[in-house]
Image (spheres, grey):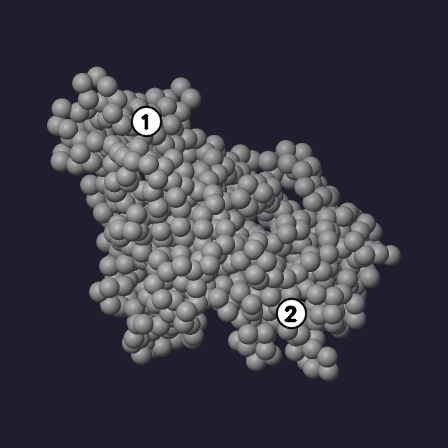
Amino acid sequence: MTLNGKWQLAVVDEKDFGGIFDNYETIDGEVPGNFELDLFRAGIIPDPYYDVNILEVQKYERSHLIYTKKFDWNGADAVLEFKGIDCIAEIFLNGEKIGENENMFIENILKCTPKCGENTLVVHILPAVVEGEKYTHEPYERFLDKHLEHLNIRKAPHMYGWDIMPRIVSGGLWRDVEITEAKKQRIVSARLITLSLGENSAKVAVEAELENIDGDSSIIVSGICGDSKFSGILEMSGDIASSEFTVESPMLWNPANYGEPNLYEVSVCAVLNGETVDSLSFKTGIRTVELVRTSIIDDEGKGDFHFKINGKKVFVLGTNWVPVDAFHSRDKARLPEILPMLNDIGCNALRCWGGNVYEDDIFYEYCDAHGIMIWQDFSMACGYYPQSESFYNKMHSETLSVVRRLRNHPSIILWAGDNECDDEIKRQKIDPNSNVITRKAIPTAISKVDSYKGVDTRPYLPSSPYCDEEAYATKKPMSEEHLWGPRDYFKGRFYKTSVCCFASETGYHGCPAPDSLKKFIAPENLWPWREKGEDYANKAWLAHATCADPVHDHCFAYRIPLMTNQVKTLFGSEPEDLNTYALQSQISQAEAKKFFIERFRVTKWRRTGIIWWNLIDGWPQISDAIVDWYGTKKLAYSYIKRSQNPVCCIFDEPVDGKISLYAVNDLQSDKKLNVKVTDLTTHEILFEASVNALSNESTLIKTIDCPADKHFLYIEWNGDNCGTNHFVTDCINLNFNDYVKAACEVGYLEALEGFSDLRLV
């Protein structure tokens, strides 16, 4: 039965804590939940997301949390399952300690014997900050050059403060709590492995991990997808049962743009004397995945980094997946509104960023069902983590648990050890290949639970970007990079001269719409964004920038002036009112992200994929996201949707006064298109013809003279695929009114959301 719902919660500051079962004052606590949300519901703290209230929340990060729940039981042996405890905790049943917890990310399953009648369950969560301060640190250890109290604690890195998330070192029972009667015989886990694909068949294996299974038991497996079926009996070998099967005419799982994401319903049953004593079922896909990569881009500009699914090269169009809420107990409820945006905007991939949690099952199930490939980071980011035996064991155990939970999802095409830790280690002039966590602890665990007779089900990268021995020795550009750079002009030298094949991060600021800003910034702080008489942001804009201390010299305080400079680069000056400022910023962001995506698509297969930063905010903030925390879409959303049309007509950048128009087709058949290009500045038709967009290629259509100065070119096509796009010949010091006039003429600004007071002339 579920133990979710109302618990009693005591929140006790470290200096006042005298013991777990002291008679502390309690409030109602919600499970799944985070204690700060309970404090807010009880009226003890103000709305954490409004104005500078986040500072009030930070005052509670040294608090002990004591959760108490009474429940009735029948006296039978039980399994108590905590899907997620954040983070370091002691667990008591009827006053007796039955377990501990030290990891936010993984399930904690405890065998226990509740008494018949009423039972009392207590979970004491210790303050993570205090526990983290108990560790001593080696000179090499780093985490964003601060917050070293995070490094040894298995908790989402972003919670300690990030440039995209506030500092909320939260705690709570953030996922479901359940108790069930213990089974005498149990199937612990099961998986399907694709071993190979033939011309019209697939060889697969099914493996089950067993517990207390009697020798006379039979393990029966079946799988079905449409008319395709397989079945049989697994061979027992100790606590593992496995067999191999040939599936004729298999229904393969494919990513979006490359076929159907077919899924098999697989059932595994333990049968004893003709009776099913335990069963387990799951959906999975038959598919192979391969990563083809070179370490570096050589002196001739050659290199490679691409994925093959079922033996076919795929072009990756995706977004980085970052926290959808600072309070992770609310993640699951937010996902159904967010996930469909991925299909709407044309993404076929996600990178689950290493500063985040591992998402809820419904996230991975959605990606499986919709052909969205997942690049899954393990939860470490922007640091040099401890190399101690203790931390090694923590990460090894975490990897075993996470991979065992997620390995049946065909959408996961890559495990990655961390986010940007190789970069951080290199900055200290240390070879990142000496990192035993990502070079040994994690891959050793993966090999135990995600390979079969030496066959890996998916590739592994130790870091993103990954600096292997060759890259470290030669210092040459790597085939996969995070393209951030100076974040000045989006068509500046840094972006135009980057040579990587695959960009797994790149982004650009966009101001939230005024209607959204008004929801989280107090009227007196709303406009201007500057502190009175100063050239830096006021405290509310800083707090949502996100500065854990909203002071002008905070390490993230640069972000608002940076966004302003991007506006000034595009339009020549800084606006004097909020509506114009927000709109110009959103245009700047939209044009930048459009350029990043199209630059990679037009050079297919020299470049093979781009995963831009990012879809949606995890709290109300000023950021690179294209959808704010409230679900209001910025202008970049509609621009990216056009740029990520599987069939898209795109102008490359001018060369010697000429511009080339390409038809990029990510689909698996040629498409006949009727294409027209109109100069909206002069209303002259520059090109009109029927063309053939070749399957899975970028095809040159026509090279024409580039109009002088700043012209807005409008591209339309119909036929086997319909769409529109545009190209601005020069994006520095644009005339704002001219741009708006052209964008309005073709309906682009109809996509504006959250500008209720804006009046376009």
Position of the C terminus by quadrant: bottom right
For mark 1, what is the residue?
267
Determine the residue positioned at 62% across, 68% down: 52
Q: Which x, y percent locates residue 331?
A: 50, 48
As drawn, the residue found furthest toward the right would be 761
Around disc 2, counting alpha carbons within 10 Å, would you say few (fewer than 14), some (14 to 19), or many (20 or more)? many
**How far apart are the two marked residues, 1 and 2, measured between alpha carbons?**
54 Å
For mark 2, what is the residue?
540
Residue 439 in sight in this render: no
Q: Which x, y percent locates residue 494?
A: 55, 69
Side of 226 relative to 522 (left or right)? left
Determine the residue positioned at 22% across, 22% down: 271
Nearest to the observer: residue 746 or residue 505: 505
Around disc 1, counting alpha carbons within 10 Å, would you say few (fewer than 14), some (14 to 19), or many (20 or more)? some
Determine the residue positioned at 40% across, 50% down: 68
Side of 240 relative to 592 (left or right)? left
Secondary structure under tag 2 reads: helix
Residue 150 vs 634, above or below: the answer is below
Position of the N terminus by quadrant: top left
Determine the residue positioned at 83% across, 56% down: 760
Q: What residue type is labelled 2?
A: Ala
* Label 1 with label 2: CB-CB less than 8 Å: no
Q: Which numbered disc, 1 or 2, marks the residue closer to the eye?
A: 2
As drawn, the residue found furthest toward the front would be 23
Residue 529 vs 441, above or below: the answer is below
- Of the numbered discs 1 and 2, the one sitting upstream in the chain is 1
Q: Which amino acid does label 1 sit on?
A: Ser
Q: Which x, y percent locates residue 336?
A: 55, 41
Residue 208, numbered label: none
